[in-house]
Amino acid sequence: MVVLSIDPQFASSMGLSQMLHLNFPFADGALGLLVKAALIVVVIRLFTAVYNLATKRSPYENIAGPEPSSAMLGYLADVHGMDSLDLHFTMTERYGHVARLKGGLFGSDGLYISDPLALHSILVKDQYNFPESTDFSGLFGIVHHGESLSSVSGKEHKQQRKILNPVFTAAHVSKLSSLFHRIATELRDRLRTEVESNPGATLDILDCLSRAALELISQGGIGHTFNALENMSSKGFHEFHAALKDVLPCSSKLFPIFPFLESWRNKKPVWLRRFLGNLAYVIPWPSLRRFKECIDIMYPTCAKIFHEKKKLFDEGGIDALANTASGGRDLTTVLMQANSEADKENRMPDQTVITAMSSILLGGQETTSGAMCRLLDLMSLHCDLQDWLREEINEALAEKNGKPLDFYELNALPRLDATCREALRLFAPVTFVWRQTIKDTVVPLQYPITDTKTGREIHEILIHEGTPVYVGISALNRSTTLWGPDAAQFIPERWMGHQAYESTMGKIKTPGVFSNTMTFLAGGRACPGMKFALLEIKTVMSVLLPAFRFKRTDAIVDWRLGITLSPYVRGKEAEGPQVPMKLSLIKEEN
């Protein structure tokens, strides 16, 4: 073994020619020459890399953008950091609808885009030039143990989407109304028991809604119940629920290793990939360890549920699943039936269906529970908003003699609909997504930006191959250029045809599939579960608001950035996401 001992001060002042005359053990032998050669190659390559990066001119140096806080990491720490939410919310107002993100020592510049016309090109017209970032697809490929909608592209993505799209139509989702109402009623009854037995007690409303969201998506999505609403006062509920809650917050802290995840998940042989994956249990990084624990819980659970359902389906068809939690109306059952009827070349393998189940559960539970919690958090700040919505819901229930409101009746409530639209605009559960550019593409701009070198207007930009592109979901949703000077304010009335907002709202045009917002994205990668999520949210609100009044506690709740937004009590961040709230029964106020 050769051990080099070089004084750092000497090494820093040493030239390449002097490097050749260093004395090593066996310096005159073949081994010494080999060590010298290897060291010289490493030094030359490192010097060349640093020199090229230092002297390389960025093609986007004439575009304004935030200065990175780290010269090494560049924009990564600022864009992905948990405390960087304000940067995303104000990016458009500070730098325009296209901003330059400066790369670090070993990274290239990226672009942060919230221009509607540019996003139409990126997400719709030229979407195949801007696939999911390998960082993103690698992460979700690992989370779901395979190729789901969130981790595939091209022909494979089209095939999966073709089979999945009919599952999420209004016609099918509307059939889940009674199931969702039953689960929401169970949540209401559990909360009522808690309030009656402990008047004035504080409840973690996020935990309650997270349990309900798991039941909504598990019963409606995969036809299985985890009994997450049983024993509401217990923190030791099903480990699968805990894994779903933890996996995205943990993964958000792993952004420094995102670039390595895609190559790792495709590593061969398989035993080597498994060996490297299991190193997460010994590396002293708590977030990485918990992330590995979560995915090791999630996949086997989904696989077990799938194989049980498939056995029943193979033996007795759709009728054999009538006794499952959803009565055979869940998305996975419909998907299995559609898959069995598809042409052989278009049929999804069992492994892909399992990853689709995992994707449905994770996407539906985390984003929906956060959206419902944010909505109740807003209502706890505005009691008049609660009263306004409660009045509308009670009137609709009275017209039906107390019978549950179905999919179409919920969508016909203008106040509830406007409140949901405004909350999802202002506080989209996912703040941004990122893409990679695989082909040079000229992208037009709806709102020209100013060249920082010449002062001229730029009406289109050439996005070079390899450029990371960040789609500013919240940045567009909060743009004062689109939504007016009060874009950052919560005003449900803007969606109700009020004269004060009619002119502004009539001019807004974006590629977004949901009310001209980017909350559910656009194009081929728009969220397929949009109608499903909206039915969940509206059903839960229509059941809880007539029963309870929601009040804030003295705790200060900060919503922090991750792959999705998560709420933390200031000073108690180590306890994990939570929203403490006080509930009182409406009947006791009357």
Image: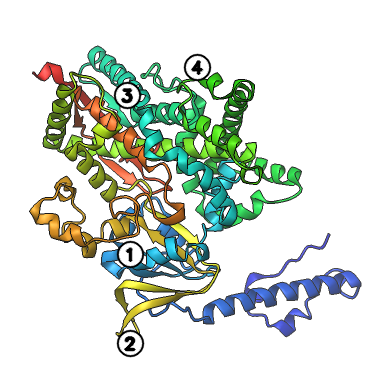
Q: Position of residue 524 (x, y in %)?
A: 46, 54
244 displayed left or right of 424: right
Pointer 4 or 3: first along the chain:
3
Q: Disc 3 to disc 2, how far (Cα)?
A: 60 Å
Q: CA distance from mark 1 to mark 4?
A: 47 Å
Determine which quarter of the picture holds residue 8.
bottom right
Q: How many residues crowd mark 3 within 10 Å: few (<14), some (14–19), many (20+)?
A: many
What distance separates the C-alpha of mark 1 from that of mark 2?
A: 25 Å
Q: Whole-percent x and y of residue 223?
A: 49, 26
- View extreme (top): residue: 197
Q: For the residue carrying disc 4, how many other residues have a C-alpha within 10 Å: few (<14), some (14-19), or many (20+)?
A: few
Residue at the disc numbered 2: 454
Mark 4 vs mark 3: in front:
4
Residue 116: image tag:
1
Indicate the amino acid at tag 2: Thr
Label 3, label 1: how far apart the Cα atoms are: 37 Å
* Disc on the earlier residue, 1 or 4: 1
Residue at disc 1, secondary structure: helix
Measured as percent of width and height from the top left, residue 302 is found at: 57, 31
Question: Crowdedness of circle 2 by 10 Å Cα count: few (<14), some, many (20+)?
Answer: few
Relative to 283, 215 lies left or right = left
4 relative to 356 in the view: left or right: right
Where residue 139 appears, as percent x and y from the top left, is 55, 49
Identify the residue shown where x is 64% and y is 36%: 350
Residue furthest to the bottom: 454
Q: Amino acid at mark 3?
A: His
